[in-house]
Image (spheres, rainbow, N blue to C red):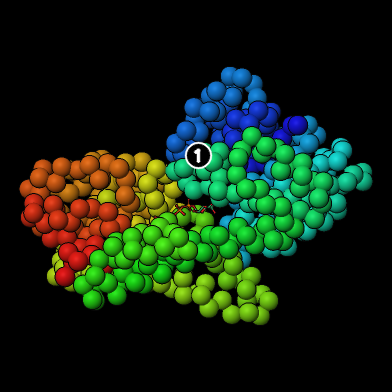
Amino acid sequence: MNISVVGSGYVGLTTALMFCELGYHVICVDKDTQKLETLRKGFIPIYEPGLEDLLKKYLAKGTIKFTKVIGKAVEEADVIYITVGTPSTFEGSSDLTFVKEVAQSIGHYQNAYKIVVNKSTVPVGTGEKVKEWIIDSQKHSFPVDIVSNPEFLGEGTALYDAMHPDRIIIGSDSASAATIIKNLFHKIKCPKLITNLRTAELVKYTANAFLAMKISFINEISRLCDAYGVDVNDVSLGIGKDQRIGPAFLKAGIGWGGSCFPKDIASLIYMTKEVNLEPKILKAVQDVNTEQISYYINQLEHRAEGVKGKTISILGVAFKPDTDDIREAPAIKVINMLQEKGATVKVYDPIALKHVQQLWTDVLFCSSVEEALRESDCLFLLTEWQEFLQLDWHQIYPLMRTPLIIDGRNILDYKSLQETGFSYYGVGRVSSR
Ligand code: UGA
């Protein structure tokens, strides 16, 4: 069974390397010549733990290949995965330009029966459109089946998530195609759910929306905790022990960002409105997330007695640890808001700084935590990188002008920080009163 993967971003590369691990030969396609060169040399252009080692291993073994020529990848494959981007449009819908381009190329170069699998996150009903686009572009008539096999990979843990999924969803209106795709994963032990095409497409959005809802929910509760002097981390622990609720995605903080939740929730809201329904919970999930940043900034202003003329040090710009992805990262909004309010902003991140350096000319980018905190009036932690959890706070204390810590991830041990002399604020922590 030969597999082609069209689109060599983080989902495409992880998918391709997962299939190599499962013993298949994979051809990866991308339009970006420079990226292809980098990949052929064994380097991964994004920061994603584990991928580079596997890439080197399978390049050496000859079971992964990279090409710009989609025709070759279509002709040689039995199964073609589409893993291209589906960015948000201005109104919140998903832009399917790249998916359509790939579908048309598949039709154009089709030389036999193919199974085309959508792994890109696409609005409900897109699988049917993909089939139309393929058939409309065929030079000769060949059968084609479409499958939706959504991804549930988290950035930073993509490879592990691909190899150890909680479930695999395979949606198709063709029972035989669904079975072929299901069998590709026979070495992975987990529930495999076969659905129709549209159901699989909606499962993907619903999963992300539900996870974002859990975070927004606990963030709303965290404000209540602030008001009543309750520790939200204990509330999360208390409710998370209930098996019907579960402990995951109940960490209160600055809110969710990234390339998936914001885009997917906007797209689901759009889909809901398209069929004249009202996205009440989805809208609230979005609103609470936006407000959480303002809530934090208000707390900071209150505790620092205003930020105008003050130096605020941001630790972490990536939207979460173990990735260099800064898309929709809360840090970007925080930095903009602090600058508007007249603060001087210093920033440090162990990996992601290179992606934000071109965003501002008047932000001070630092090459170490110490440099970022020297003469600072406030440390604002926005990404829970391991490095920040291991800091020697006794050494940090004398560096800062004002020993104020705003913990945007509720991760630091406030008792020992307070003993060291810091003022600490984390959302909904008893320390904050
Ligand atoms: C998310 C989903 O978790 C994946 O299952 C999905 O495949 C992926 O989107 C996608 O659609 O491609 P990801 O965006 O990598 O993965 O990141 P998450 O770990 O879900 O975190 C999202 C945001 O929520 C981050 O900003 C994180 O800091 C925040 N978060 C997460 C919290 O604020 N609290 C939590 O308890 C958990």
Task: Left or right? Give the position of 316 relative to 14.
Answer: left
Residue 130 lies, with reference to residue 162, above or below; the image says below
Residue 110 lies, with reference to residue 203, above or below; the image says above
Coordinates of residue 150 in the picture (x, y in percent): 63, 51
Viewport quadrant of the C terminus: bottom left
Q: Residue at x 72, y 61 (%)?
A: 198
Tell me the kind of residue under disc 1. Answer: Tyr
Q: 106 or 289, which lies in front? A: 289
Task: Left or right? Give the position of 399 relative to 158.
Answer: left
Q: Quadrant of residue 95?
A: bottom right
Residue 300 lies, with reference to residue 367, above or below; the image says below
Coordinates of residue 94 in the picture (x, y in percent): 62, 61
Coordinates of residue 308 in the picture (x, y in percent): 18, 67
At label 1, counting other C-alpha atoms closer than 10 Å, the crowd grade (few under 14, some 14-19, many 20 or more) is: some
Q: Can you name the residue that lies furthest to the right here?
A: 141
Answer whether residue 428 is visible to the viewer in this image: yes
Instruction: Give the residue at mark 1.
Output: 160
Coordinates of residue 66 in the picture (x, y in percent): 64, 30
Q: Residue at x 78, y 58 (%)?
A: 128
Q: Quadrant of residue 124?
A: bottom right
Q: Regarding mark 1 in the picture, which secondary structure is present there?
A: helix
Residue 401 lies, with reference to residue 301, above or below; the image says above
Q: Quadrant of residue 426?
A: bottom left
Q: 391 or 263, which lies in front? A: 391
Whether the residue carrying mark 1 lies under 8 Å from ligand 1 is answered with no
Viewport quadrant of the N terminus: top right
Q: Residue at x 66, y 80 (%)?
A: 276
Answer whether residue 72 is visible to the viewer in this image: no
